[in-house]
Amino acid sequence: MDHGWLSRFRTASDLDTAGLPARLATLAFKALLFYGVVWGAAQYATRTGLFATIHRPVTAYLRDNAVGLPMTAQDLIDLWALVGIGGFLVVAVLRSRSARLVWLAWGLVTTAMVWAGTAQPGRPIATGVTVVAWACASLIALRGRG
C-alpha cells in the first residue's frame, strides 16, 4: 500500500544521515554570513545617518497623526518597527509568500510616511533614500526568489 511521501522511509536506516554534518555546517555558515551582512548594514545605517533619515520622518508622521487613536504614538512606532523587522526575518528565513506581501506593504507605507513626514527641501531625497534602502534590504530578504 502506497502512503505517498511516507512510503519512501521504511526504516530508520533508509534516512540519509551521512551528509547531515556537512549540511549543518553549511547552514551555520550561511546564518553567520547573513547575520554579518545584517549587522554590518545596521552599523552603517546608524553611523551615516541613514537610519535617522528614515526613522525621524516616520516617527514625526506617526506622532502627528496618532491624535484621537486608542493607541499611543509610541505604540504605533513600536508596531511599525516590529512589523518591519518581523516581516524582514520571516521573508528572509522562512521565505513565506504571504510575508512578502507584508514586506511590500511595509515598504510602501514607510516610504509614504517618510514623504509626508519630511519638510519640503529634503522630501524627494529622503524618499529616494528610503526606496533605495528598502530595495537593498529586499535583495537580502527576497534572495533566491524568481
Image (tube, rainbow, N blue to C red):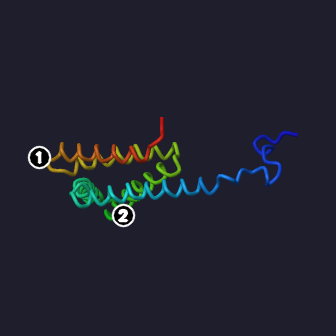
Q: Is residue 26 above or below residue 144?
A: below
Q: Mark 1 = which residue?
A: 121
Amino acid type, callout 1: Pro
**Quadrant in which residue 32 is drawn:** bottom left
Q: Left or right: where does residue 62 sit relative to residue 89?
A: left
The answer to which quarter of the image holds residue 34 is bottom left
Q: Which mark is residue 75?
A: 2
Rendered image: mark on residue 93? none
Pair 2/1: label in front: 1
Residue 20 point in image, percent of width and height: 64, 55
Is 59 in front, or is 25? 25
Residue at image coords 53%, 50%: 94
Q: Residues within 10 Å of mark 2 (few under 14, many from 20)?
A: few
> Residue 114: x and y, percent?
25, 49
**Which of the image's four quarters has the N terminus?**
top right
* Above-or-below relation of 85 to 109: below
Between discs 2 and 1, the one toward the N terminus: 2
Q: Outermost residue toward the right?
A: 1
Q: Give the secondary structure at mark 2.
A: helix
The foreground one among 129 and 110 is: 129
Q: Residues within 10 Å of mark 1 (few under 14, many from 20)?
A: few
Q: Are marks 2 and 1 in contact (CB under 8 Å)?
A: no
- The residue located at (51%, 44%) in the rendering is 98
Q: CA distance from mark 2 to mark 1?
A: 29 Å
> Which residue is drawn at the image coordinates 49% and 56% (left, top)?
29
- Please state which of residues 26 and 5 is positioned toward the viewer in this rendering: 26
Identity of the residue drawn at 75% across and 42% down:
5
Amino acid type at circle 2 is Asp
Lateral position of residue 4 relative to residue 71, left or right: right
- In depth, the one of 23 and 53 nearer the eye is 23
State the image coordinates of residue 33 (x, y, percent, origin top left).
43, 55
